[in-house]
């Protein structure tokens, strides 16, 4: 595994469901993993400040029961999954449709076969700050976003093309953002800029 001090992208290769649940929970919130038979989760995880991009694959059918801790966009690079929440369900299929999870929402993610996915995790505080910049008033709580995301066009198409960038390209982008923060920040001790792979919510 490549440590964050060397690169903003690190890789995981896990064949134990309990270990996968721990790593997935660190990324997405509370996650329980249910599998039958041999299981393999491989992923490249790239931290870009308040946004994290995960390009991953599972080798067999998987069911994830999730209580989301962040905003998460779910897209497919290959295979089909179904995300269900609040009595509604949406397919996650490459170039066709995706799903959006909101903080606190309980959902079930299930694939019926091997699956290659793209996810984008967005920190709730960051999204609230962007909404405040647009509207002039910060939401008092995390807005809940509709579950379904149409694929193939904006905005899903833009997100998908961005996520399809190679981990190396994303890592270079993360490194350039880190250099920019350190150049612009004049504070002698900045929690964000002092980290090799900044992921805090400190504001320079």
Image: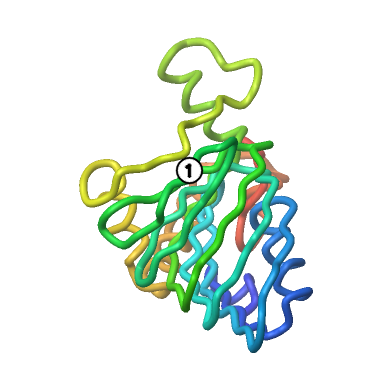
Q: Look at 43% across and 13% down and name the residue there.
A: 135
Q: Quadrant of the C terminus?
A: top right
Q: Look at 53% across and 47% down and name the residue there.
A: 72
Q: Is residue 48 left or right of residue 1?
A: left
Q: Position of residue 63 (x, y in %)?
A: 62, 65
Q: Position of residue 181 (x, y in %)?
A: 51, 48
Say which of 102 and 130 sits in front.
102
Query: Which residue bears the numbered disc 1?
Result: 100
Q: Is residue 185 above or below residue 143?
A: below
Q: Quadrant of residue 203?
A: top right
Q: Look at 70% across and 50% down and name the residue there.
A: 29
Q: Quadrant of the N terminus?
A: bottom right
Q: Is residue 120 above or below residue 185?
A: below
Q: Position of residue 57 (x, y in %)?
A: 49, 76
Dot 1: what SS?
Answer: strand
Q: Is residue 32 left or right of residue 203?
A: right
Q: Look at 51% across and 67% down and name the residue there.
A: 111
Q: Is residue 117 above or below residue 135?
A: below
Say which of 114 and 143 sits in front.
114
């Amino acid at each position: 595994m490549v440590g964050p001090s060397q690169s903003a992208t690190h890789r995981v290769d896990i064949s134990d469901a309990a270990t996968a649940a721990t790593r997935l929970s660190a990324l997405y919130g509370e996650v329980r993993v249910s599998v039958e038979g041999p299981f393999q989760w491989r992923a490249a995880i790239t931290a870009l400040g308040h946004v994290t991009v995960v390009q991953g694959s599972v080798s067999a059918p998987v069911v994830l029961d999730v209580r989301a801790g962040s905003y998460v966009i779910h897209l497919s690079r290959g295979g089909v999954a179904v995300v269900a929440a609040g009595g509604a369900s949406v397919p996650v299929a490459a170039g066709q449709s995706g799903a959006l999870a909101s903080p606190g929402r309980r959902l079930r993610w299930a694939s019926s076969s091997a699956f290659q996915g793209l996810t984008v995790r967005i920190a709730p505080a960051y999204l609230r700050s962007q909404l405040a910049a647009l509207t002039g008033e910060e939401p008092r709580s995390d807005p809940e976003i509709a579950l379904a995301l149409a694929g193939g066009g904006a905005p899903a198409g833009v997100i998908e093309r961005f996520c399809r960038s190679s981990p190396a390209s994303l890592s270079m982008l993360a490194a350039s953002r880190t250099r920019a923060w350190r150049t612009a920040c004049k504070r002698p001790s900045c929690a964000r800029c002092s980290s090799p792979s900044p992921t805090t919510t400190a504001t320079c």
